[in-house]
Amino acid sequence: MDDTRLHIGIVSVLFDAKPEGVCTGRLLRALLEAGFKVTLFTSDKAKLGFSHDNLIIKVISSKPREPRSLFKLIARLSGQIPNNFYIWGRRVAKQGIDSSSDTGSDSNIDTADMPDVIYGRAWPHASLVAAYQLAIRHTRPLILHFSDPFPPPNESLAKPKFMQDLQQMLDYASALTITNAETIEYQSRYLSLDSDKAHVLPHVAPPAKQYLDSVSENRQFHYIGSAGHKRPMDLLLAGFKLHLQQHAEDQLIFVGTEAALIEPLIKSLGISAQVEIMPFSNQLDKFIAQSSGLIAVDTNVADPIYTPTKIVEYLNTNKKVLAITPDGSPVQKLLRECSQTSVVVADYHAEAVATGFSNLASLAPQASDYDSRFALMQPFSASSVASRFADICAGLNLKK
């Protein structure tokens, strides 16, 4: 059997929206380009509009979601797994079972068109549950994807029953995909993982893009995307303030970052004239083209395991990169392979961040340095990730 002709059912509350939805969207496109047929079971929280000859999209209503306490009780009494999209998940599980039932979608999927493999993409956790239920109903192989581990580093342990539910789904699954080897090792501390079942499936990077040399006269550094409460923006801003003592004309520009989270910090540090907050934009090229360096900030945790999509996107441009990331993190390991075009700060102190800005400004990469970096990013390309997914499917010994 040619595994690239497999029909994959991707189950995800989100698609092309929010970080996990964007990652799912990129993977789905990669699989389509590689020749897979895909049915996407998603919700009304997805960003819709994408189409492809080999793609079927089933939009299933996520409402109602309240009262969650009642839905949790119903799930437990019915021997099911509670989650925050309980009704949506039950409707997904009914796909192909009874076309006259209330699925909350415009149309059901015919049993004959049920995918060969069901792939649950989390976040949120509900996507895993819905995929698990659908796979059981149709006796299909199940692959699960953990975009983040359970529990995330430096967060309180999940309730035992929640972890038991995860273990139940994982035991049934034929495979588990995680974005890097470090997270697999971390996850194995909390869940029983069969070493043959866990696979690294990297983020799909957007195609490499080389911008013409249009850097502004005064250096502009860009932080693109949300900041959140866990990333130390106070550290980044304090470090930049120290950097300004030697480079007073430099600018730090936030794009699509919540102003309420960082504006008070900017004002308290007295650097409002050199720091600008721009609204969210779907047209980032104009900012990246002008940038003297793209900035990423990781959470400082004891178990640094994340490979943020931001880094994957940054490294596929011909722009310098500054990453504040814990020592030993996947980001540090990756950027050390392209030190001619990037700087890593693993010391979470303002003085170290200031030095990082100065070191980044002093880098003078050649075109060949970026060519080497693009080659380093090849495992994150759409074709490479799709090939890796095909290998995982081939290992399931499916028979059509």
Image: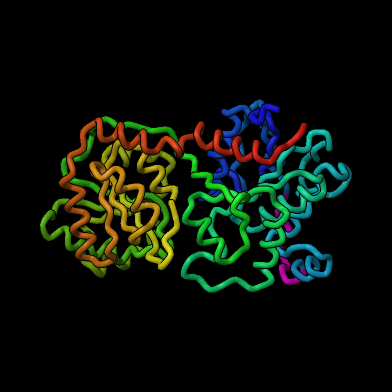
Q: What's the residue at 44%, 56% (across, down)?
A: 306
What secondary structure prevails in the magenta region?
Answer: loop
Q: Is residue 29 magenta?
A: no
Q: Is residue 68 magenta?
A: yes
Q: Is residue 45 among what the camera can see?
A: no
Left or right of residue 129: residue 124 = left
Q: What's the residue at 71%, 44% (across, down)?
A: 118
Residue 6 pos. (x, y %): 69, 32
Residue 238 pos. (x, y %): 24, 65
Residue 362 pos. (x, y %): 15, 46
Q: What's the residue at 35%, 51% (across, down)?
A: 333
Instruction: State the quadrant of the C terminus.
Output: top right
Residue 26 pos. (x, y %): 53, 39
The image quadrant of residue 299 is: bottom left
Name the one closer to the observer, 347 or 218. Answer: 347
Q: Is residue 242 above or below residue 101?
A: below
Report the number of numbered marks. 0
Q: Is residue 346 above or below residue 225?
A: below
Q: Is residue 29 among what the camera can see?
A: yes
Q: Is residue 267 above or below residue 13?
A: below
Instruction: State the quadrant of the N terminus.
Output: top right
Judged from this view, the residue extending furthest toward the left is 246
The image quadrant of residue 57 is: top right
Q: What span is colored magenta in the figure?
A: 61-70
Colour approach in the figure = rainbow
The image quadrant of residue 231 is: bottom left
Left or right of residue 342: residue 376 = right
Name the one closer to the observer, 231 or 129. Answer: 129
